[in-house]
Amino acid sequence: MLQYYCPSLTSYKRLITKEVKVGALVLGNNHPIRIQTMTTTNTMDTDATVAQAIRCIEAGAELVRITAPSKNEAENLLLIKNTIRAKGYNTPLVADIHFTPNAAEIAARIVEKVRVNPGNYIDKKKFDILEYTDAEYTAEINRIRERFTPLVNICKEYGTAMRIGTNHGSLSDRIMSRYGDTPIGMVESALEFLRIARDENYHQIILSMKSSNPLVMVEAYRLLVQKMDEEFGECYPLHLGVTEAGDGEDGRIKSAIGIGSLLEDGIGDTIRVSLTEDPEFEIPVCKDIIKRYANRHSESGNETEKIVLSYDPFNYKRKETNTIDNIGGHHVPVVIAHYGKLKEITTTDLDAIGYHYDETTDKWNISDTAADYVYTVDKTIDFPLPGTLKVLCDYTVWRKVKDKTKYFPVLSAREYMSIIGTIDETFFVYVDANRPHDEQQLFINKCKEGSNAILCVESSSEHPMQNIRWFLNELALQGIFFPIILISRSNKPTVDEQLIDIATNTGSLLIDGFGDGICLINTELHNSKRSGRTYLPVKNEQQFLNNTAFSILQATRTRISKTEYISCPSCGRTLFDLQEVTAKIRAATHHLKGVKIAIMGCIVNGPGEMADADFGYVGSGPGKITLYRGKEIIKRNVPGETAVEELIQLLKDNNVWIDTIKTA
């Protein structure tokens, strides 16, 4: 039996899955984590599709997916495949199918793998509220069996692999009627198809549970593993991805949190990072994600004794903690900026963390992404501080500070244990989760004596996430509810790698409900460019870390500080220039804090994924856009030339528009 949903919650162990062959490539059964992407060209444009596929292959893609929305595109896959093979590339190709079983049956005879979406392969989504009796529901399952079985038999005959890929945004009305818009609905949608395939003795199957919300995605994959283990006693390989992740820093962070949280627990056999960028730019991000696991040795076997959890890993709920000052309880997680590298701190140094001093007015302008605390380590600040900013410093420095309303001490675990009960003010305690069990238990016992501390927790372990999770779980089980600041320290050499490293280590814990604040620390970054890599623009390290901290909190839905864009990565179905339009919408709306805007190239996942968005901009035909408010269509067939302006007017009509960025 698994540990709830994975082989181990305390160490790195790969989930052993069935071995599946995709052409000559093998997935699952502890083989390396495979990288894949998807073309964005029109599938009927053979030359463009071949050229882009080759660019992706040369960048490192081990599978390349191509959309086949109709029989014509499915048939053209033969020409595309033959042309790619003639140029000396044998990378397996995957046909992406939505709505058209006939296209899937054609493609399955040509390419090495087909992807079907159980939400729209046979079932339909019209956002109808339907009620099914058990007999009616069973009849629908039988109808699916009748229509899906021919594809299964073709795949068996031709040795073609299949991905049963559930999308949160395209669950059928039938599934929605029984399970709602939930992770368990996503799981059951896939299992219905998997059961049919198993009945036909067909097992060359990979599964996926994609969502634009990392919390939903992680819960769905965990449930899927649990259900497969319970029902079949075995698990099929898993394709990981956050769909409609967006672009730039936000897209990378959201993907790292969703994919990385599962990889940390040994779940995942192949990944795709869905960025609103050219597909070859997804590959370096995939490489950075899986690089973290290249030298990890998966221990054999499962835990002999099941770990007791203080939380439900299948239903997100933020951990209850005490409220101390503005940390813990109902407060949003705080952001702490680490300024230990500076010899002295000036007003201009605070620009990077959201505080701009105006000498003319002698006032501070405070952004929505302004840090709550600054940790100065061994120094004080010799100018009047912004009203919302507070200072942490080492205990020995704090003792000499006169203004105890602005400064708070940081104690080591040793200092805390020796002076417990002697400090009346708010204080912080630094603790390394990577300590021998008896030392940790001694510390926990001291915490039980009742001093209200805020714990700043990191781990010197080579793999810190599991170590910190174990420690925080122990605290909760033993009745310690001190607020927790998650410290993540990265020594990776590039911006990209640090972004992935920090987002995975911190976001994984936030997804499990742990954390009342975060503090990010890094080594010096070098922005030297190498061929084949992209780098994010960084003015300085503090700005990079501050932006990353708020983006992590936004991606985990624990603190909303800016506009959120649910933007699909484009494909051959896309009906407009997605990158150009996304940039235009972002430029016009980036100041609308808390508003979620979906930008979708076509209707496949558009309306469904927009169930998690406030407003939507969806391609509905050549040069035509449909605008949504939630799931409700507001305007159809808006000309693309005026659609962004119409979206802005829709925002104004719904009283969410502001003309300027507000500062305090």
Image (cartoon, rainbow, N blue to C red):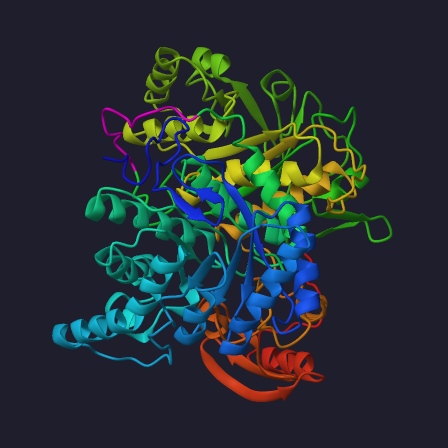
Quadrant for the N terminus in the image: top left
- Which corner quadrant of the image does residue 644 belong to? bottom right
- Which corner quadrant of the image does residue 284 belong to? top right
The residue closer to the viewer here, 492 or 345, is 492
The residue closer to the viewer here, 278 or 644, is 278
Q: Is residue 155 left or right of residue 576?
A: left
Residue farthest to the left?
A: 135
Quadrant for the C terminus in the image: bottom right
How many numbered badges does the structure rendering display?
0
Residue 591 point in image, percent of width and height: 67, 64
Residue 83 point in image, percent of width and height: 65, 61
Residue 153 point in image, percent of width and height: 31, 63
Residue at point 35%, 36% (across, down):
16
Q: Is residue 469 left or right of residue 288?
A: left
Magenta span includes 299: yes
Can residue 548 be seen by looking at this rendering?
yes
Q: Is residue 645 left or right of residue 634?
A: right
Residue at point 41%, 18% (across, down):
421
* Vertical relation: 646 (above or below) 289: below
Magenta span includes 269: no
Residue at point 83%, 53% (across, down):
361
Give the magenta-colored segment's residue range: 298-310
* Vertical relation: 368 (above or below) 130: above
Residue at point 37%, 77% (across, down):
125
Q: Is residue 490 left or right of residue 227?
A: right
Helix, strand or loop for the magenta stretch, by majority: loop
Residue 448 point in image, percent of width and height: 32, 22
* Vertical relation: 456 (above or below) 319: above
Can residue 564 be seen by looking at this rendering?
no
The residue closer to the viewer here, 180 or 430, is 180
